[in-house]
Amino acid sequence: MKKRNIVFVAALCAGMILSACGAKETEEASMFESAEAVTEAAQETVETEAQDAAKDVQEVQAGETEGSESVDAPADAADYSTTTGLCGASLKASDKDKAGQFNEWGVLNTIVYEASLEGDSIIAKGTMDYRNEAGQDSITVSEDTTHVFKVDENTVYEMRGGEDGAEVISKEEFAEYLTSLIDTGLFFEVELNEGVVTTASISS
């Protein structure tokens, strides 16, 4: 009888030990599964944030690009892609018919009768002269055609005349002046360096 009791107690202890081990393994498995779930959730969060960041960058780049959209030049536009020098003409829309005609002094009229600044291009229609440097007489006068001048982030825009001299203005302001002053007779000029406008100005 005593031996049977000892065997029973031993079996009971073994059962308790096995039960405890099983509970520990279950707890460890549960903790492992929880850790995996946390890791997966963290990875999903990182991936989502990365996708959102990439989307934000694309939107910002799209916004920047929109303001500097390239304008295709007409097939018959004058080619200034490699030009270095100055081109200029009077802004006089009402004298469109006189563009390219000789004036009373026997000089060809240089007249721009339509002009705008769109994206990365200044577009001017009419006849314009060309000079190698400021203060020089005209070397050539173009035909009545479309002139497309490329601008970039370094282009300077100026309003010249008066006692205060040249006033540097923004690209947006220059675009407004260029269209609003188209029939004033003021002098419009661009200075080019290898096809890119370094300075665009309107002078009284």
Image (spheres, helix red, strand yellow):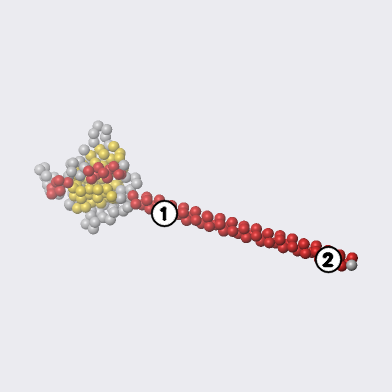
| Left or right of 122 on screen, residue 31 | right
Residue 195 appears at what percent x and percent y? 29, 50
- Residue on which the image places disc 1: 58
In this view, the residue farthest toward the left is: 104
User: In which quadrant of the rendered view does residue 156 lie?
Assistant: top left
Residue 92 in sight in this render:
yes
Question: Which residue is the site of mark 2?
Answer: 8
Q: Amino acid at mark 1?
A: Gln
Q: Is 8 left, or right, of 132 in this rendering?
A: right
- Taking the spot 32% from the left edge, 52% from the top edge, the residue there is 69
Residue 189 visible from this viewpoint? no
Tell which of 165 and 44 is nearer to you. 44
The residue at 20%/44% (across/down) is 182
Label 1 environment density (alpha carbons within 10 Å; few <14, some 14–19, many ≥20): few
Residue 58, position as x, y percentages in the image: 41, 54
Give the position of the N terminus as an image quadrant. bottom right
Other-residue count near label 2 (Cα within 10 Å), few / some / many at <14 / 14–19 / ≥20: few
Q: Secondary structure at mark 1?
A: helix
Instruction: Report the amino acid beneath label 2.
Output: Phe
Task: Identify which residue, 79 or 160, lies in the foreground.
Answer: 160
